[in-house]
């Protein structure tokens, strides 16, 4: 079983895949052909650079194809328990500070944007919890507790 991705992430990955398999692949093939025309391949830095770029491109294409093939697209659900796709307002018990987090699959996790992986320690603790509940998890600084203020 793969991971979870939002519909927006799926569209973004499909667009990137199309760009890589059409435009970028063509550019790299042209670069490889041009570098070949420069002569001796054993000492041809342009050729080796173009081949390396081709390898990286192919790796990224395979990564995207794998994510798209093995991921489950989740619709934003509004319910009374924390689930993937939910936006959760949590309050840190120790200092009463609040944070708004969206629970996402690991592929989309980005804490700077408030997107928390359901597999992270906090994400795992929040999954299935309800408004008013206090969840705890092990942080590098010790056990941390959050109260769930709202789910949308």
Image (cartoon, helix red, strand yellow):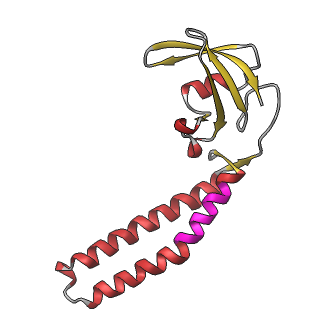
Tally of marks: 0
Would you identify the image quadrant in which residue 148 lies? Answer: top right
Magenta stretch prevailing secondary structure: helix
Q: Nearer the viewer, residue 79 or 59?
A: 79
Question: Is 122 colored magenta in this rendering?
Answer: no
Is 68 placed above or below 6 here? below
Q: At x 67% / y 59%, what residue is drawn?
A: 11
Question: Is 13 colored magenta in this rendering?
Answer: yes
Is 129 placed above or below 94 here? below
Q: At x 55% / y 30%, what residue is drawn?
A: 120
Residue, far right: 79
Is 132 placed above or below 16 here? above
Where's residue 111, x and y in %? 54, 35
Residue, far left: 43
Where's residue 89, x and y in %? 69, 24
Q: Nearer the viewer, residue 110 or 84?
A: 110
The C terminus sits in image quarter: top right
Q: At x 21% / y 80%, what residue is drawn?
A: 44
Where's residue 68, x and y in %? 63, 57
Q: 25 left or right of 33?
A: right
Is 119 placed above or below 9 here? above
Q: 112 left or right of 130?
A: left
Q: 34 left or right of 80?
A: left
Q: At x 80% / y 38%, what residue is drawn?
A: 77
Q: Nearer the viewer, residue 145 or 95?
A: 95
Q: Which residues are magenta?
A: 10-20
């Amino acid at each position: 079983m793969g991971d979870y991705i939002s519909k927006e992430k799926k569209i973004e990955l499909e667009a990137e895949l199309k760009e890589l398999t059409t435009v970028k692949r063509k550019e790299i093939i042209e670069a490889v052909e041009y570098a070949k025309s420069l002569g001796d391949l054993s000492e041809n830095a342009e050729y080796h650079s173009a081949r390396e770029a081709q390898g990286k491109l192919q790796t990224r294409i395979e990564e995207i194809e794998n994510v798209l093939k093995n991921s489950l697209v989740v619709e934003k659900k509004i319910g009374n328990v924390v689930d993937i796709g939910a936006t959760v307002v949590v309050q840190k018990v120790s200092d009463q500070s609040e944070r708004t987090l969206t629970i996402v699959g690991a592929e989309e996790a980005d804490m700077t944007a408030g997107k928390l992986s359901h597999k992270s320690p906090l994400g795992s603790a929040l999954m299935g919890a309800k408004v008013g509940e206090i969840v705890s998890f092990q942080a590098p600084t010790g056990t941390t507790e959050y109260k769930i203020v709202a789910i949308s």
